[in-house]
Amino acid sequence: MRLHCKSIALLALTCLALCFVAGCTEPPAEPVQLKSFSLDTADAVIDAEAVRVETNTACEGGACLRVETSGPKKIRLFVLDDISVEDAFLIFQAKVRSQDLAGTAYLEMWCVFEGQGEYFSRALNTAATGDTEWLLQTAPFRLEKGQNPDQVLLNLVIEGPGTVWIDDAGLYRAPLQ
């Protein structure tokens, strides 16, 4: 009986110590927005001819971009040459909605490293398909210390016929943790 009581006391002290340590640690830092992209117009969009602006109260700010396609299509949204990020996650984030989409639609981010190649990240785990309400999609890219992309390409990929909307896009930096 004494051994059992000592075990319970030791377990209680261990739990108390873990709670104390957990309470003393700082919460993870929130992502910091590096760039916000207005999708109220198609002016800054690379493939502007592939999208049209739709005024809708469901869109952030009252307008968003709409893509109607009869088959697979990659929409080049933005190209950034002035990003200075390393030793962090670079995150492309936007809201995506679909209607009558036979395939999937997702965000894609390419990081180009001059002389070293091009690498991508895709938001496949939250891809839109069929009829969906607004989904928050994120495409994270892990950058180690000394890895700073020379160029970042931000795309919307649609793999099949249907209609897709995109809104509230941004590029963020988050600590690696």
Image (tube, grey):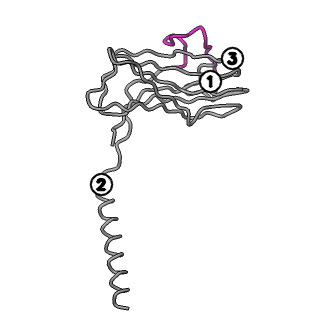
Tell me where the magenta segment starts and ends, as one range: 39-55
> What is the number of the mark on residue 63?
none
SS for tag 2?
loop
Give the spatial CA distance, label 2 vs label 3. Answer: 50 Å
From the top left corner, tell me how far across and down residue 112 is, in percent: 38, 18
Give me the residue at 34% from left, 90% from top.
Answer: 2
Reading the image, the residue beneath label 3 is 71
From the top left corner, tell me how far across and down residue 13 is, in percent: 31, 74
Q: Earlier in the sequence, mark 1 or mark 3?
A: 3
Reading the image, the residue beneath label 2 is 25
From this view, report whether residue 26 is shown above or below residue 22. above
Q: How many marks?
A: 3
From the top left corner, tell me how far across and down residue 61 is, in percent: 55, 25
Reading the image, the residue beneath label 1 is 165
From the top left corner, tell me how far across and down residue 169 is, in percent: 50, 26
Q: Is 118 displayed left or right of 61 in the figure?
A: left
